[in-house]
Image: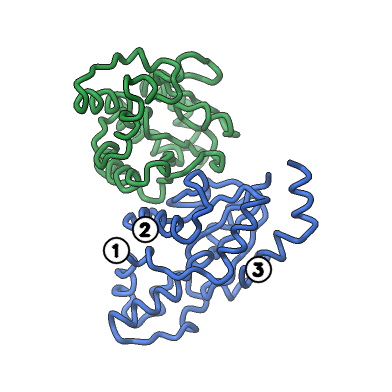
Chain colours: A green, B blue
Amino acid sequence: MKRVIIDMDHVMADFTDQYLSWYKEKTGVDVNREKLIGLTSESLAFPDPKLARSLLFVPGFFRTMKVMEGSQAVVKELNEVYDVQIVSSAMEFPQSLIEKYEWLQEHFPFISWQQIAFTGNKKIIKGDYMIDDHFKNLDYFEGERVLFTASHNLLSDKYTRVNNWEEVRALLLPETVKKQVVDSE
Amino acid sequence: MKRVIIDMDHVMADFTDQYLSWYKEKTGVDVNREKLIGLTSESLAFPDPKLARSLLFVPGFFRTMKVMEGSQAVVKELNEVYDVQIVSSAMEFPQSLIEKYEWLQEHFPFISWQQIAFTGNKKIIKGDYMIDDHFKNLDYFEGERVLFTASHNLLSDKYTRVNNWEEVRALLLPETVKKQVVDSE
């Protein structure tokens, strides 16, 4: 069974929506989504980057993110034909560890604890496919790299890009692949 | 820089000592360390395996483990010449996530968050060396496998065995290796 490594923030969880709405709630300032384009360090898009960054350490930030549209259905389908592994860079925000675990339990209950990893970097991860929004993660991956569109990665087309979960389905779950995988079991 | 993957329980942290002493504290029953020999599922060594296993979910169990003798000094030395990555199977016991993080901060403060990963399985991990006490982890590793002695793994000699941290030092930090690694930087 081929292994698909799937990222959480910006891929399964709507990090940008959470960041913009929490900033607005705390400061009253509405930051336009377009300000994030091309910024790897997203806090720099906000008038007060330090305050923005501090939000990432507030309990609840990671626990209450919205689920990315279509992700639940497609991850569930992937889970039937691939060895799905959820790998999230969580270590920078230690309070997020349990929150991310609980978030997965709530929104992706078909993902077992054996399929979750929280890392400080992803250079140590191996698999056949990696779906991620960060070049810093994909750059070190030896399998096939799938760039999930996020504001900060719009300016480069280094890897196969998917804009949403429908495009992930089209890329990784065409009828022929489903059949091949099932046949080879 | 070559990457060394290091396990926590039984390798950096004295899991067996903690398990025996917590069981004794809760039940008054003193279980001999020899009962654990060859048992991959260690709770089976205790008269009440279900109670024993429940201890692994009690807050504080992972946070208060003793440090394995010699581990701090040798991991620190390894950290100077290798890309050291601490990789622990923590996902089965979600409450252990933050405890293991804090334990590392307390006892191994020179290990940064970029060097820590908590996983549900270690099949997804790549590196040049893996120091671990479990065959289920070493079996899938493509680099050099180093079996750290624990009661449960005494009955097989599948991989290079080290009995303590002095032997890790001798294996991975002979003078010639230290020099080679520094020269190649």
Circle 1: element type: loop
What is the spatial separation of the Cα atoms under label 1 and label 3, in whole angstroms? 32 Å
Chain letter for mark 3, please.
B
Chain letter for mark 1, please.
B
Same subunit, tags 1 and 3: yes
At x 58%, y 58%, the residue is B138
Which mark is drawn over residue B59? 1
At x 32%, y 15%, the residue is A33
Left/right placement of residue A70 relative to residue B43 reads left
Query: Contact (CB < 8 A) between labels 2 and 3?
Result: no
Q: Quadrant of residue A133?
A: top left
Tell me the mark number nearer the camera, choosing from 1 and 3. 1
Which mark is drawn over residue B161? 3
Q: In the rendered image, which residue does mark 2 sit on?
A: B99
Left/right placement of residue A178 relative to residue A110 reads right
Q: Is A18 rendered above or below residue B159?
A: above
Chain letter for mark 2, please.
B
Same subunit, tags 2 and 3: yes
Query: Tag 3 or tag 1, which sits nearer the N-term?
Result: 1
Residue B182 screen position, x and y as percent: 75, 47
Looking at this view, is B164 or A149 the one in front?
B164
